[in-house]
């Protein structure tokens, strides 16, 4: 499976902005966790290559039955990238509860900011803390 469109190209024929388009893909925590696992299983030489990541995530989105695997793959890629940026800036020691982080990353809205698409730091942290307190 080849990744045929980029997140920017996905927006070309759509009146919504990129973040709104990517936020329109409904994801669950387990789907997000599985997408992280897909990337972890890539061969070492592909693991840090954005094109290889995008192709793998689009194939995953197709395998699990998303109606538009290109948009779903782009949404997964954007959320994984946003999580990496947020972790580096706000939780480099990875002290947050991993399950709460995964659940928040699957659900929290992406925003288009100065550093590109990502999570608004404070609001994302608040969501993680809220999820940590849920009595699952």
Image: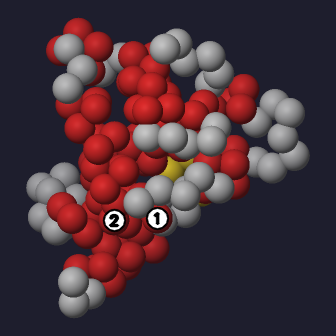
Q: Where does label 1 land, which residue?
A: 107
Relative side of 126 to 7, left or right: left
Q: Where does label 2 land, which residue?
A: 103
Which residue is rendered at x = 28% and y = 49% of the image?
33
Q: CA distance from mark 1 to mark 2?
A: 6 Å
When the figure is inspected, residue 18 is found, relative to residue 20, above or below; the finding is above
* Residue 123 seen from this side: yes
Q: Position of residue 37 (x, y in %)?
A: 23, 38
Which residue is rendered at x = 69% and y = 49% of the image?
21
Q: Residues within 10 Å of mark 1 (few under 14, many from 20)?
A: some
Q: Position of residue 40 (x, y in %)?
A: 21, 31
Choose between 43 and 50: the one closer to the eye. Answer: 43
* Dots 1, 2 in contact, CB < 8 A: yes
Relative side of 27 to 103, left or right: right
When the figure is inspected, residue 3 is found, relative to residue 65, above or below; the finding is above
Q: Residues within 10 Å of mark 2 (few under 14, many from 20)?
A: many
Q: Position of residue 75 (x, y in %)?
A: 54, 43
Q: Position of residue 7 (x, y in %)?
A: 63, 32
Relative side of 100 to 51, left or right: left
Which residue is rendered at x = 62% and y = 25% of the image?
6
Choose between 22 and 111: the one closer to the eye. Answer: 22
When the figure is inspected, residue 131 is found, relative to residue 40, above or below; the finding is below
Choose between 90 and 63: the one closer to the eye. Answer: 63
Q: Quadrant of residue 23?
A: bottom right
Helix, strand or loop at disc 2?
Answer: helix
- Work out which quarter of the rendered image holds the C terminus and state it: bottom left
Choose between 61 and 89: the one closer to the eye. Answer: 61
């Amino acid at each position: 499976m080849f990744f045929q469109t980029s997140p920017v190209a996905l927006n070309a024929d759509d009146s919504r902005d990129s973040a709104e388009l990517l936020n329109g893909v409904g994801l669950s925590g387990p789907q997000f966790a599985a997408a992280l696992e897909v990337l972890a299983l890539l061969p070492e030489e592909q693991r840090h290559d954005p094109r290889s990541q995008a192709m793998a995530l689009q194939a995953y989105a197709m395998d699990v039955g998303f109606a538009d695997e290109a948009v779903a793959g782009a949404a997964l890629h954007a959320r994984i990238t946003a999580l990496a940026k947020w972790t580096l800036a706000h939780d480099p020691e990875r002290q947050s509860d991993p399950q709460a982080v995964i659940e928040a990353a699957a659900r929290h809205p992406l925003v288009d900011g100065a550093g590109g698409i990502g999570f608004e730091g404070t609001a994302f942290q608040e969501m993680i803390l809220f999820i940590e307190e849920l009595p699952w």
